[in-house]
Amino acid sequence: MPLLTKSRLTAIPSHKDIAKLTKQFTGREWVFKEIGNWLKPGNKSFFLLTGEPGSGKTAIAARLTQFSQSETSLHPDFTPGFLSAVHFCSARDSTSVDPKNFARSIALQLSGKCQPFAYALKDVGEKSVNIKVDFRIQKAENSAIQALVINNLSVGGLSGQEAFNRAVLDPLTTLYNQGVDRPFTILVDSLDEALTHSGDVTIIDLLSKLPSQIKARWILTSRQEPRVENAFILLEEVDGLFLSDPEFSQDNRRDIQDYIKKRLTQEDKLKAQVAGLNLTQQADQIAQITDKSDGNFQYVSFLLDSIANAKRSLSDLEGLPEGLDGLYYDSLQRVVDLGKKDWSTVYAPVLGVLSVARENLALSQIQAFTNPSDQTLLLNGLNDLQQFLEETILNSNHEEEESYYRLYHQSVVDFLQKRSLIINQKKLNNLYYLYPSDWNRRIADYYWNCYHLTPDKDWRECDLYGLRHLNAHLNDLATVKKTPSYAREYGERLSKLLINFNWLQAKLDATNISALISDCDYLSDDTDVHTLKSVFELAANTLNQDKTQFSGQLLGRLTPCSPRIQQLLKNAQNWQAVPWLRPLTASLTKPGGRLRRTIGGHTSYVTAIVLVPKNFGETSYAISASADQTLKVWDLDDWTAIKTLKGHKRAVRGLAVTPDGRRAVSASEDYTLKVWDLEKLTELRTLEGHSDWVNGVAIISWTLDKKKLLA
């Protein structure tokens, strides 16, 4: 039977999740003061809150979310509803760092907060074949006014950049053009973890390249990661705060002491241990924990949880290590010693597969990947490791509850993947080091052996996790330079999979054509894979609308140019899942020609297109004009629509761009021409005077002091 994986959009935390993240939240008033001052009008577009791992960034983001979600004011600097949308990234949940999910998350939240945005998003859905907006009209609560409610949003056929452009930027631009002056403030947590996304475009790219006319404001949190900081600092539109700066050491120390006191006096399990200490002893223990934590909230939280769960005693903290790595090391040592189980056969496999997993893993998946001979031993091992794990109970497709697990904090993953540690100012080998390739191999081998090497199994039976992420695990193994024999073996497996028809069809059915195109980038030097990528790009517009045409697209565009391609076509020809029309000859446009891809987006025929040059005659983007009354600006590197330019009231018939690439002029059946600013992607002016259709336009001279065009 295939394993069951529950797909969840965890990037939008529930009230329950927020309550968990902010449990016993204390202090941080000095941080909130800085953010509150930044929120005042006239400040920069971004506020970047950075800090070392475990410094409390996510808890602060969750507390801000709590301020916004509350119906009554919880803080004088933050009114209820001040955040228009929130998104929490996690490297342990690949869906949360996927730019498409990010775009969908933000768009759905904005539509729920702002009716004009909801209507603008609905209009986008009606004019695009690759984005579907499911909505209903209902009466607003306690009112006779009708409200538009967006039930769901599908962006599966788009790239991450295009999904963000269409679902977020286009509606926002429409609002600004309509004169809507409402402020939008959006919070994105753990932006550094978005770097784990394997695609060409990350959430960081989306936010750091926002058009200047987008006036939304962004609260971002991240570790001190140069790739994040440099992306925004260069914009000169960033204010920020580094939580771990020595300048704030006294503020952090005071907050941590207050946090410890609050938990010791309010949690029953901890109060029982405090009862055996006199006031002097209590003060000494609070000071000792504070000193050892070195300003790290995660250290304190993990330690107090261990004490509450009887893993440690509050009255016996002698030898408590300094720093988060030291605490994890000491705690794992205690687990192994007290649990009396073998590290390498019981605990390491569980932590190992979870350290490389790209989503939460079901109990059944952990069992399959670790292959324990005794399920009871696995469950006991999970119980021993509970302080390092986060467990969620979800319903499977058969409505049966199943436990899903992940490591409870990214700092645990970091610890397990360090060969050596600095503990109490001494360097030592990490006895609990887990080599990532060993555990990537466990996961990859399970799927390969189960579905590729087993004759009576088919990739259509594979669970969603495998279809989404097997290629990523294989690629991680294929790029390990320290073990060239393994790298070669798993590179060959990846190559076979990317030319395997049954795999490709199963993955397409479970995901979308963009996922297949992205997978091909893992083996860009493989000739057959490169050919297939070209086919996928040519067929993308069709397959975004109908996945059952996959076999027909392959047979219509490919010739048996190699033994592997020949076998692929043979398998495609024998596909019988649904009735379909099989091409007798390869009569569609083939890869390797001048046509690279068909781009869909306009809702009527395209009347003109102009390539906009950049330095040395290269092409950076294109502008198209259409009978749907719009122009679109296209990025020719990733085939996405950067912006839709609206303003004409009838079909656009002609288009011209100035030699410097800074202006475009469009001619329309509405008797007008419009001049567009291509740097800001906004309309500059409308030229009137014709008494009938304007069918064309040409730039006859364009200098700084003299500008002439012919229409």
Image: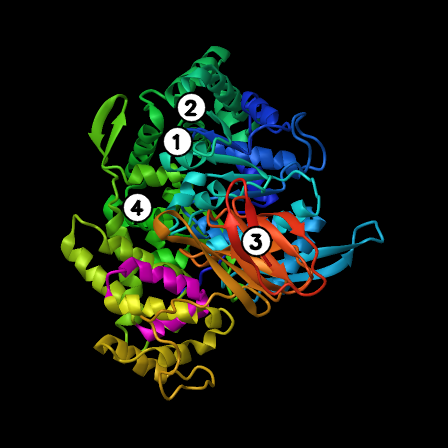
**Location of the C terminus (image quadrant):** bottom right
Q: Nearer the viewer, mark 4 or mark 1?
A: 1
Q: Quarter holding the N terminus?
A: bottom left
Q: CA distance from mark 2 to mark 1?
A: 10 Å
Q: Is residue 131 visible?
A: no
**Relative to 15, 434 lies left or right:** left
At mark 4, the secondary structure is: helix
Inter-mark Cα distance, 4 to 1: 31 Å
Q: Which amino acid is tagged 1?
A: Gln
User: Horizontal and vertical percent for residue 410?
Assistant: 39, 40
Q: Observer-nearest residue: 144 or 259?
A: 144
Q: Which mark is residue 368?
A: none
Q: Pointer 3: what residue?
A: 709
Looking at the image, which is closer to me, 537 or 623? 623
In x, y percent, where is residue 331? 34, 33
Image coords of residue 639 (percent x, y): 44, 59
Residue that numbered label 1 is attached to:
224
Q: Under tag 3, what secondary structure? A: strand
**284 lies above or below 238:** above
Secondary structure, mark 1, is loop
